[in-house]
Amino acid sequence: MIVPFLYALRRRKLPVGTQEAVNLAKALSLGLHESSLEGFYEVARALLVHSEQHLDDFDIAFAEHFRGVTFDAVKITEEIRGWLEEVQKLRELTDEEKASIEALDLDELQRLFEQRLKEQTSRHDGGNRWIGTGGTSPFGRGGYHPTGMSVGPAGGGSRGAVKSADARRYKGYRTDVVLDLRQIEVALRRLRAFNREGYADELDIEGTIDATAKNAGELDVVVRPPRRPDTRVLLIMDVGGSMDPYADAVSQVFSAAKRATHWKELRTFYFHNCVYGRVYRTDHFGDPIGVHELLRVTSPKYKVIFLGDALMAPYELLATSADEPGNPPTSGLHWLSVLREHFPHSIWLNPEAPRGWSGNTIEAVRSVFPMFHLTVDGLTEAVQELTRRR
Amino acid sequence: MTTEFRRFRGTPGYLTSDALESAVNCSLALEKPLLVKGEPGTGKTLLAEAISAAFEAPLLTWHVKSTTRAQDGLYVYDTVARLYDSRFGDGDVRDIRRYIKFGPVGEAFRAERRVVLLIDEVDKADLEFPNDLLHELDRMRFRVGETGDEVVARERPIVIITSNNEKDLPDAFLRRCVFHFIDFPDQELMRRIVAVHHPGLDAALLDQCLAVFYEIRGMQRMRKRPSTSELVDWIAVLQRAGVTAVRLDRELPFLGALLKKEQDLAAFADQLSGGRKFRS
């Protein structure tokens, strides 16, 4: 019952592996779950989940898996034990994983578990929560099954584990749906990088010691420039029209970027639907700057984030027009390519869900920029793309 | 492996839930650090104090800052003092041990009895910080490179780590921890928490305060939703000022104790005046 549950968790992208299984087996053998499904729910959650973003998936998997089943602690440990023996033979494990399994004495584990069971039987004699099933105990205590336990509403005053899993109280912490300001800030923080530059006014202790030692003990003070943030970011946003429904999300990204104090520079520009020759410094399309002028004043070191739905009438992207009289006519798509070529670290964040990303202008824009969905997960991937070395 | 250990059941001043007790007990039994996350103001740091009180183990706190390095927690070799002494001839500079200053982790290992080691706000430091501590927390020992001395924990400390989620923690680190996410308390638990801080508070006033508090927390577009500590402070202010009744309106007394951001005050006023569509 447990191992399929672990796999159910893995199918839901929870990173549970051997180490988690070992921990769970240890905890159960120590009786931490206090022989109840509620207790098992708490213990499993503490040991198998490592981040609140996975709590919701854990609850879903738990409710699906344990609905109406009989909780049988003996079988569980048997099962984990069997699985651990199996896994040692079959899977390629890292040395660390192997060591952690070997460190776990399976016989000892089994012995403790039996001991535990005996304690439980004496303690729960005459209790109303233990249900005899007869002759199924692996320890040969015929006639009843000491830990078989029903999961139904008979659980008494305490809240049922399946019921509390069903409540899905952690929905709000999923990272593939929500986007709140703090999470955006956290994601963007990873864009930072440091560099030493400027006036050398920081004492380099290691350097001083080295230099002093080389100088036969005469003090030789070494100074260096302090470590400063060295990330420059361009945020280029689509406003108006089809972007209106996403105004809240966009404004959150914008305020998170503005509040990021760990960047050397942040510049923001606006466009409508697509970039044609120029972008604007205000969201009411005032104070334009030509794309070529923009490229002249910004080095390719800038990290560039486009934020827009990339949805427009095809002609807006593909039709050619001259940005200035006398210049050769170019299409919106061409302008995007010009920007992409100049900025190797550039990505496009799209608030539209990825299922609507083909068969329209989004597909064309995606062919130019790596595109990510405007969620915490998408933003995290986007930041990874931006910080990749080229 | 021992089956007998004392279980944590909370203290009179610190109320816990089944899930939290279970996580603490897992961490004690499996001898793994307990990683506690949750909204600010849900009592992550207080948990360490409660465990320290419950087990009568001294508490050693390591407040992590953005500049903190893992090494600082183990020990610091005060090279400058030694250099200074060597030039101005004060004390025996040949004895490097005189210049090794142990950090909180080092002190916890060296302690005569079991202690609670709180590594507070681990996410404040550099991304690599937790990884640098993995080995030491696992093996409960480290070597002082300068002297060759090995520091081994006499009594394995109870390690509590808190995080505010400012950065993701490395997977390898997460895998070694027991994780608990402190939920925001529901009204019932909150009532008990407030009673711990303000015994003898008028029940009617408490009802009103809780109603207003949860109403405000439920409001749209709050950047920083008020937390437990803000509620406790707010009630303290109300009591001092002799306020006997509150209700949710624009003239809510001492609103500043609950909402700390200008945008939130604006959003609050805005939603009370009829919920006009508001965009910041």
Image (cartoon, rainbow, N blue to C red):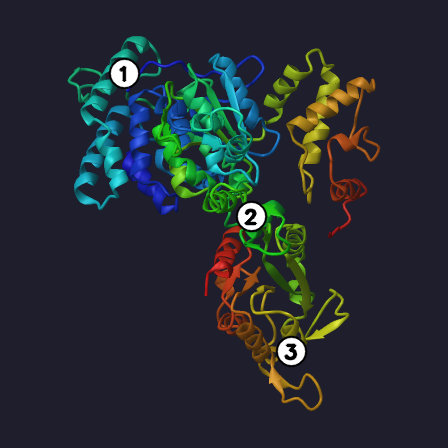
What label does residue B66 carry, if any? none
The answer to whether tags 1 and 3 share a subunit is: yes
The chain letter for the residue carrying disc 3 is A
Q: Earlier in the sequence, mark 2 or mark 1?
A: 1
Q: Residue at x 73, y 36 (%)?
A: B260
> For the residue labelled by badge 1, is the local secondary structure a helix, a strand or a loop?
helix
Q: Position of residue B186 (x, y in %)?
A: 59, 27
Q: Earlier in the sequence, mark 2 or mark 3?
A: 2
The chain letter for the residue carrying disc 2 is A
Task: Count numbered badges in the picture.
Answer: 3
B187 left or right, relative to A44: right
The amino acid pointed to by label 3 is: His
Q: Quadrant of the N terminus of chain A?
A: top left
* Comparing labels 1 and 3, the label whose residue is closer to the camera: 3
Label 2, label 1: how far apart the Cα atoms are: 64 Å
Front residue (pair A139, A224):
A224
What label does residue A222 carry, if any? 2
The amino acid pointed to by label 2 is: Val
What label does residue A292 carry, if any? 3
The answer to whether tags 2 and 3 share a subunit is: yes
Res A150 → quadrant: top left
Q: Tell me if residue B16 can be seen.
A: no
B185 left or right, relative to A36: right
Q: How many neighbours does mark 2 have within 10 angstroms: few (below 14), some (14-19), or many (20 or more)?
A: some
Tell me the residue that label 1 is attached to. Answer: A116
B261 left or right, relative to B227: right
The chain letter for the residue carrying disc 1 is A
Q: How many neighbours does mark 3 have within 10 angstroms: few (below 14), some (14-19), or many (20 or more)?
A: some
